[in-house]
Image (spheres, rainbow, N blue to C red):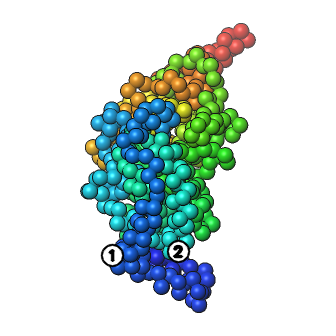
Amino acid sequence: MSSWVLYVEARKHSDARHEGPSSPKTASWNEKKEIIDEESEETEKLRTFILIQCMKITMLASAASFPQLFLEHKTASIFKVPQGLREQSPEHCQPKVVSIGPYHRDDSKLLIQNQHKWSCVCFLYLVYRLDLDSWIDDMRRWEAEARRYYSEAVSMDSQQFLEMLLVDCCFIFVVLDIIDKKLSTALPSDQIMLELLLLGNQIPFFVLEKLNKYTSTPEDITQLALHSFGNIRTLGGRQLQIRPGMEKVHLLHLFRLSLYPADIESSAIDVVHPPLHHAEVESKAPAVLNSTAPRHVPSATELQDRYAVKFKKGTADNFLDIQFRNGVMEIPFLQISNYSGTLLCNLIAFEQCYRPIEPRVATYAAFMDCLINKESDADLLESNGILLNRLPISRNAAVFFSEMSPRAGFPNSSKYLDHVFEGIHSYQNNRWNRWKADLKLNYFSNPWVSLSVVAGAVLLIVGLIQTWYSVLAYYHR
């Protein structure tokens, strides 16, 4: 029995719990169970029917007529990962389970192939009453728009391109439904959700919204995706949210929108509408916009030993919300793993390629690379509950962030951490803070030294008192 039949069975039992054993909906699940199986004859008939529907699409243009359009268009948002990042971290860029969109479509080694996705089309058609005719008619008018999202020419004719969008949309919708409802499945759900956030594994978000529009489900695709990512992510384990009215170009962009620091007001984030209606202009900084502070910070151990800076686990919901106040640096928790490495790598690649957005994640990675120069720096942050290292034994946190951070250091176009740089350098330039740090380092670095200093101070005080009484006794003779 296929994984999709298991999914149907899980949905059946879930509905039975809520509606009772005599529910007519439960009976409908029984009738549809065998049809959903991709190996069944009925599924193949339904697939043929849907293909016939897709072939009704009028060819808008041949595939060869599109490349010049792509070269002229400046707001493409779906890219292949830049070669430098791809060569440095190939394991973070290539899907292993499923291909979404055209860039990895011909990879025959992937676990999930097109026939599995057709099972999802059948599922939505039967269970959620997907209105195929209306979706096809609508997408005929939006095909050129969808093609413009890709930075490279898509060598597929109209029928192939729209068929790809259909099966990929339906697959994404079903997977998000499984994760959101926490249904048991034989699918590698965590890996699939991770691969839905690969930069080269995307489809335009408005296509998902149109599919959502032509089904009977009451669920909004944006909230469904945010709930699903919140269930499986390792970067904080929170319920993801975005501010109303934010434009989304694809799922990776939607995930990134949920990472805005809490102190940035929604009014500071403007959304503009160029010809494609899908570009974002973000706030340039939460605080100091014209900072003259050097864009570099000492390592974590140097900040602690030379300047008496304390490190504290931040309470913010996302890892980007770094704060520095009164000598205390608050950094939200981050679990370092291959999973978080893939997320950071693809977010940074997206920021490098998609110019309308500020490279905040790249700035974060460069900042953490400055803090963590050696293993003792990582140990200091781990002891304060800021990091949790889940990397293989052969790799450490210092290597992790050096691979993630841009080769040229901090991106000049990002201002979001300027308030932290300003605070740190102002604190460093205060003489009292340096004296306090020297006192702590030289005289209170361990209990025995501290005990010796206290004993010496007591002896000095006793000696002074004894001298004072001796002088008083001499004058009273």
> Considering depth in this image, is 32 or 134 the residue closer to the camera?
134
Q: Residue at x 63, y 32 (%)?
A: 283
- Residue at far bottom of view: 22
Identity, as a three-letter code, of the amino acid under mark 1: Glu
The label on residue 139 is: none
Query: Residue 43 location, x and y as percent?
Result: 39, 75
Element marked by disc 2: helix
> Considering depth in this image, is 461 or 367 the residue closer to the camera?
367
* Label 2 CA crowd tier, 10 Å (few <14, some 14–19, many 20+): some
Query: Residue 395 location, x and y as percent?
Result: 31, 42
**Residue 224 in which image quadrant:** bottom right
Identify the residue position indicated by label 1 in the image: 39
Q: Is residue 212 above or below residue 351?
A: below
Query: Residue 311 location, x and y as percent?
Result: 53, 36
Q: Earlier in the sequence, mark 2 or mark 1?
A: 1
Query: Residue 365 location, x and y as percent?
Result: 45, 34
Q: Is residue 81 left or right of residue 426?
A: left
**Residue 211 in which image quadrant:** bottom right
Identify the residue position indicated by label 2 in the image: 127
Identity, as a three-letter code, of the amino acid under mark 2: Val
Q: Residue at x 51, y 60 (%)?
A: 136
* Label 1 CA crowd tier, 10 Å (few <14, some 14–19, many 20+): some
